[in-house]
Image (tube, grey):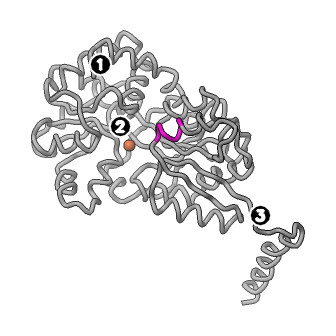
Amino acid sequence: MRARFIAFIISLFVAVVPAFATGQAEQTQDVVHVYSHRHYETDDALYARFEELTGIEVQVVQAGEDELIQRLKAEGPNTPADVLITVDAGRLYRASREGLLQPVDSPTIESLLPAHLRASNNEWFGLTIRSRIIAYHRDRADRSILTTYEALAGDAFADNVAIRSSSSIYNVSLLASIIEHDGVDAAREWAAGMTESFARPPQGNDRDQLRAVAAGEADYAVVNTYYLGRMLTSSDPADVEVAEQIGVFFPNQPGVSGSDGRGAHINVSGAGVTRYSDNPEGAVRLIEFLLSDEAQAAFAQANYEYPVRDGIELAPEVAAWGDFKADTLPLEVLGQNARQATMIFDEVGWR
Ligand SMILES: [Fe+2]
């Protein structure tokens, strides 16, 4: 009781003293403006919690991934944004290359976040992990022939893999990782071989690839894990019916014959402080908070993704897919190899 009373008195001081000191509490209240592609209630709850902990208000603008970057570019020094939150290391890398972000010096972030999940120039940081996996039909597919991404380009998978178009940054990043691990020539051969494995001309998003598997158009698909989590828990019974027919295979695991054991390809959604932020301190505090135990657990539950830190509880649907080894390639390499990946897609006719 007494401790609670003291806490109450302290909270009064925290709230009131700055107001006395400045005489204009409203105007001086700290605000961090976030440009985010994410649109989850969980995120709003996290921002409210951050405000409660720090007194820093969070204001969010939501838009599509590429639109956010276009907007930052167009606004230049006049942007209200302090933090950019977007998906795919390839896109974060591009934002950094285009001078839209600024380096951050935070020992907290450095201690929480493994080096391969952030930019070496400290301009962006992973917040959640997704893996690009092989989905298969639980009854029709032959799970025993699944080994690696590389193997999908072989005869055993001819006309039997659903995968979206090469304009998807998810596929650009996957090929960028194969360029790094296998070399350019092998990567080109792989991409060419994959076009022979297509069950149909690339079309639709990742969910549509799962629907194609359920509908019998293909026995295998390449998708990001969280789409399956979303469909499993969808309010649309048709989505649930699709998702329940799908199994998850993590490619390139150690101990699998024909596998180099490098681990399944992963990517992140991530954040950076904008180049022209007028509140970089607040922005860094928000990113630090988003890497805390509390925020990481909430993020993982909200979008069926993997936390960037160990020891955080997964959503039950995600935990059910089992443990896997993730590729530890520094994610900025995906951005570095993106151009080459796009050229290869064009060369081999992967639309
Ligand atoms: Fe996505």
Residue 174, by quadrant, is top left
Residue to which mark 1 is pinned: 191
Quick one: label 2 or label 1, which is nearer the N terminus? 2
Q: Amino acid at mark 3?
A: Gln
Q: Label 2: how many residues lie within 10 Å, few (<14), some (14-19) or many (20+)?
A: many
- Label count reads 3
Placement of the C terminus among the 4 image quadrants: top left
Ligand 1 found in image quarter? top left
Indicate whether residue 340 is drawn in magenta.
no
Left or right, 134 with reference to 177:
left
Distance in Å between CA atoms under marks 1 and 3: 56 Å
User: What's the magenta region?
Assistant: 65-70
> Which residue is outermost to the top?
185
Residue to which mark 2 is pinned: 132
Quick one: label 1 or label 3, which is nearer the N terminus? 3
Residue 227 x %, y %:
32, 48
Q: Label 1: how many residues lie within 10 Å, few (<14), some (14-19) or many (20+)?
A: many
Establish if 84 lies above or below 170. Answer: below
Asked if marks 2 and 3 touch (Cβ < 8 Å), the reply is no
Left or right, 63 with reference to 83:
left
Placement of the N terminus among the 4 image quadrants: bottom right
